[in-house]
Amino acid sequence: MHYHTCLSMRALFQEDDAVAISALADELSEDAQININGNCLTPTLFREVITSQFRDVFLARVISITDLNVILLNPEGTTGVVAQNSKYKTKGKADGQVLVQSATTIVQVEEQNGKKVMSIFEAQTVDER
């Protein structure tokens, strides 16, 4: 069930843009359902937002994960639901401005035809500017 955490770390919270773009291209299923702050995003739009609007402008790092709950849905531990509350920093690449933000995320990971399929629901806030 750490599939979601690993994908998030590779796609969002590291400095290597090539690895992040590759992770999103290779590991995010076209069946994924993504909802961030009430906005439904297709996997294609999510990739575009992350690569051209987020990663082009910001560097991000996790400060803490204050709550993490994992419910496994099969004995192998490959499907389930992850709920977490995390705090992270984003730093503007151009201006160096730092934002401290929080996110509450619920992710369901299923398997379809041998591939992982995620449904992501997330609410984000800006805590400090």
Image (cartoon, rainbow, N blue to C red):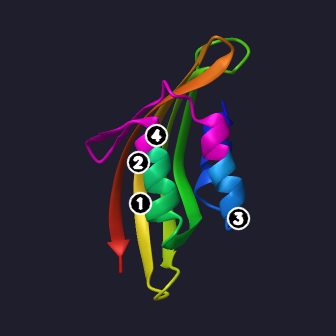
Foreground label between 2 and 4: 4
Q: Secondary structure at mark 1?
A: strand
| Residue 21: % across, % down | 63, 52
Residue for badge 4? 44
The reply to whether the C-beta atoms of the residues labelled 2 and 3 are less than 8 Å apart is no
Contact between marks 1 and 4 (CB within 8 A): the answer is no
**Counting other residues with Cα less than 10 Å from the Cα at mark 2, is it few (<14), some (14-19), or many (20 or more)?**
some
Picture coordinates of residue 46 (x, y %)? 44, 45
Please state which amino acid type lies under the numbered disc 2.
Answer: Thr
Q: Choose the circle earlier in sequence order: 2 or 4.
A: 4
Residue on which the image places disc 2: 104
Sequence-wise, which precedes: disc 1 or disc 3?
A: 3
Looking at the image, is mark 1 or mark 4 nearer the viewer?
A: 4
Q: Position of residue 124 (x, y in %)?
A: 35, 55
Alpha-carbon span between mark 2 and mark 3: 25 Å
Residue drawn where x is 36% and y is 81% of the image: 129
Secondary element under disc 2, as helix, strand or loop, is strand
Q: In front here: 11 or 44? A: 44
The disc label shown at residue 102, or none: 1
Identify residue for label 3: 16
Image location (x, y in percent) of residue 118: 52, 29
Measuring 65% from the left and 54% from the top, which residue is drawn there?
20
